[in-house]
Amino acid sequence: MTQESAPRRVLVIDDEPGVRGYVRRALDAAGYVVDEAAGGRIGIDLMDKAPDLVLLDLGLPDMSGEEVLRHIRTARPWVPVIVWTAGSDAHAEVRCRSLGSHAFLRKPLPLSTLLTSIGQVGRASPNAADTTRSGGFG
């Protein structure tokens, strides 16, 4: 398998099963390999599968999405993270950006917007072409 044909792996960390399933089906159809986590601790453990991108919900049951983002930035700083939330905290985006998120989206949003954001972040990631660390996402 060549680098260009290698699957792009996305880790979806969201506590809502319906949301994870919906996103999984859409990403599967778009050619992505998807791993799912219902909480932050499981998401952190799944970073061992070397995702090329993480889609991270802020409202998780076991730890905050911001805590998960800190862990990801420490363990795998080259992996792009898109944060999304249904919350209304006006300062969350600023905090997440300062922690290193690549994009911040508000739920609900059209699936096309999510897919476009994933593609843009994957291409814009400074390490997207560095397949030794990121798997060549984008």
Image: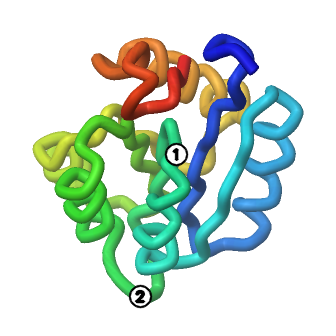
Residue under the point 60% across and 44% down: 10
Residue that numbered label 1 is attached to: 51
Q: Position of residue 70 (x, y in %)?
A: 20, 61
Residue under the point 52% across and 65% down: 46
Q: Is residue 24 left or right of residue 46?
A: right
* Closest to the observer, 111 or 28: 28
Q: How many marks?
A: 2
Residue that numbered label 2 is attached to: 62
Q: Earlier in the sequence, mark 1 or mark 2?
A: 1
Amino acid bearing label 2: Asp
Q: Is residue 114 left or right of residue 59?
A: right
Judged from the image, the secondary structure of the residue bearing numbered disc 2 is: loop
Badge 2 density bin: few <14, some 14–19, many ≥20, Cα 10 Å: few
Judged from the image, the secondary structure of the residue bearing numbered disc 1 is: loop
Q: Position of residue 8 (x, y in %)?
A: 64, 31
Residue under the point 83% across and 39% down: 28
Question: Marks 1 and 2, how far apart in space?
Answer: 21 Å
Q: Is residue 113 above or below residue 55?
A: above
Q: Position of residue 47 (x, y in %)?
A: 45, 59
Q: Is residue 90 visible?
A: no
Q: Is residue 16 visible?
A: yes
